[in-house]
Amino acid sequence: MPQQNSAIGLSWAPKVPPLTNGTKNSSDKLPGQTKDSIWRSDNELVDGLYVPPADPRKLNKLLKKNVKDTAGGSWFDMPAPTITPELKKDLEILKLRSAIDPKRHFKRGEKSKTLPKYFQVGTVIEPASEFFSGRLTKKERKATLADELLSDHTFKAYRKRKVQEIEEQHQPGGVDKWKIKGRQTWKRAKQRREKAGH
């Protein structure tokens, strides 16, 4: 086996494609090189290192991708959180907050049905003066707004009453109301009376 001369120290040179002078038909190209070998895809690495594209359009597109999605400087660069199913439910409940409590009136929000992109979720910490009046006990505290509303007894009673009112409004009147009961319909009641008479 032939012995190779080992150099002392490290020597490394990146395999970067030659730069052109801005002309399309450049004579600097090597005979075996094609356009595909010069322009590398974004995810391709050269000698284990990432080389940004030389095309300004591709470079601007890449820079736009790397910019963090925030609400801007006037909102202290609030990031857009990832929306989980629990967060989605909470946001939908907040949109319908006027239907939750009949005695509270809220300012009408946006009419759009889309969820907000930038928001933050926090925990309200009550002061010591509200220990007996406005504080939630440990049993009342839940992980999400939906769980908290489902465990609230006053909201359950209000919701039940409202559902009954709506069902009574849509319930048919007169003889039609007998059709809903199935076995004990008006027609069958007549048949039962005839059988009992015989």
Image (spheres, rainbow, N blue to C red):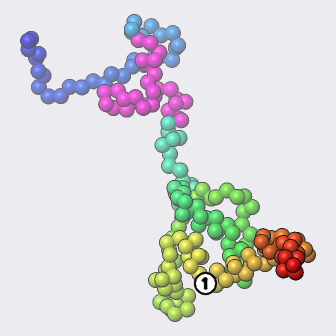
Few, some or many C-alpha atoms within 10 Å of disc 1 (few <14, some 14-19, many ≥20)? few
Residue 153: image quadrant is bottom right
The residue under the point 33% across, 22% down is 15
Residue depicted at x 52% and y 14%: 23
The quarter of the image holding the N terminus is top left
Residue under label 1, please give it. Answer: 153
Q: Position of residue 59 (x, y in %)?
A: 50, 32
Give residue 131's position: percent from left, percent from top: 49, 91
195 in relation to 71, above or below: below
Q: Going 11% across and 16% down the picture, which residue do you hit? A: 4
Q: Is residue 1 left or right of residue 70?
A: left
Q: Secondary structure at mark 1?
A: helix
Dividing the picture into quarters, in which one does residue 88 lie?
bottom right
**Residue 75 shown left or right of residue 66 in the figure:** right
Is 55 covered by the magenta stretch? yes
Residue 47: x percent and y percent? 31, 27
Q: Measured from the top left, where is residue 138 in percent x and y?
A: 46, 83
Residue 43 among magenta residues: yes
Residues in magenta? 33-61
Res. 19 visible in picture = yes
Q: How many numbered marks, from 0 up? A: 1
Residue at left 52%, top 13%? 24
Q: Is residue 119 visible?
A: no
Q: Amino acid at mark 1?
A: His
